[in-house]
Image (tube, helix red, strand yellow):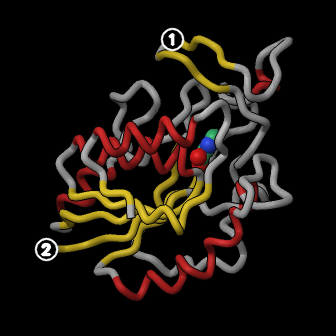
Amino acid sequence: MTHALLVIDVQNDFCPGGALAVAGGDEIVAPINAMMEEFDAVILTQDWHPAGHSSFASSHKGKSPFELIDMPYGPQVLWPDHCVQDSKGAAFHPELRTDGDLILRKGFRSGIDSYSAFFENDHQTPTGLKGYLETRGITRLTLVGLATDFCVHYSAVDAARLGFDVTVRMDACRAIDMDGSLAAAEQAMRDAGVTLA
Ligand code: VGL
Ligand code: ZN
């Protein structure tokens, strides 16, 4: 059984002082670094948007961050500009260990967001992570990172649906928590068969 740690989006823009700061986002860096020792493989994801990305409220006239819009692929929350490719905000937290095996970038197509590390927000376009994990014989995944209710949530649910044995270490995650999104995410993860630890 090969067990990987999947570290979701521990980037400056999701930490205090960042463009889409998650409360306490930086508190999970030291515990995640320590956990890396315990796994057969370590994979990090990086939210990686081109300037003017369609998930940015600034790309939609008259819209504000945290409003919901309809995109061709379904509803989409609009965000402040964040994790713009090559910006300081898109960089990993400076204290995060980045000597893992794979860094997977997502959200790099202008017209579609990608919360999940497996599929873009149309739930169809693959990122390639499934093939990578299968090719390496990885069957168990432990997820940590930011944000619990968005990228961790969607990644965990997709992983479970794809047949991986999935645990989310809630103590090493932090949430945005808008309009009950954390409670809804916890329920959706449990319903998908994800273990919340
Ligand atoms: C995320 C909102 C927008 C996340 C990424 O990493 O959870 N949330 N982009
Ligand atoms: Zn994003």
Q: Please report contact status of discs 2 and 1: CB closer than 8 Å, yes or no.
A: no
Instruction: Tell me the quarter of the image containing the N terminus.
Output: bottom left
Q: Position of residue 73 (x, y in %)?
A: 47, 16
Along the line of sight, which residue is nearer the eye, 157 or 108?
157
Q: Residue at x 64, y 26 (%)?
A: 77
Q: Position of residue 83 (x, y in %)?
A: 70, 49
Name which residue type carries label 2.
Met
- How many numbered circles are shown? 2
Q: Report the disc number at residue 19.
A: none
Residue 103 is left or right of residue 87, and the answer is: left
Q: Which residue is mark 1?
A: 72
Q: Residues within 10 Å of mark 1 (few under 14, many from 20)?
A: few
Give SS at disc 1. Answer: loop
Q: Report the disc number at residue 1.
A: 2
Q: Residue at x 54, y 17 (%)?
A: 75
Task: Looking at the image, tell me whether mark 2 or mark 1 is earlier in sequence order.
Answer: 2
Q: Position of residue 161 (x, y in %)?
A: 23, 41
Q: Is residue 78 above or below residue 158?
A: above
Q: Position of residue 34 (x, y in %)?
A: 51, 86
Residue 177 is left or right of residue 160, and the answer is: right
The picture quadrant where one finds residue 11 is bottom right
Give SS at disc 2. Answer: loop
Where does ligand 1 appear, by image quarter?
top right
- Under 8 Å from ligand 1: the CB of mark 2? no
Along the line of sight, which residue is nearer the eye, 127 or 165?
165
Name which residue type carries label 1.
Pro
* Of marks 2 and 1, the one in the foreground: 2
Q: Residue at x 62, y 50 (%)?
A: 175
As measured in the structure, the alpha-carbon distance from the residue carrying label 2 to the one carrying label 1 is: 39 Å
Along the line of sight, which residue is nearer the eye, 148 or 128?
148
Q: Residues within 10 Å of mark 2 (few under 14, many from 20)?
A: few
Residue 113 is left or right of residue 169, and the answer is: right
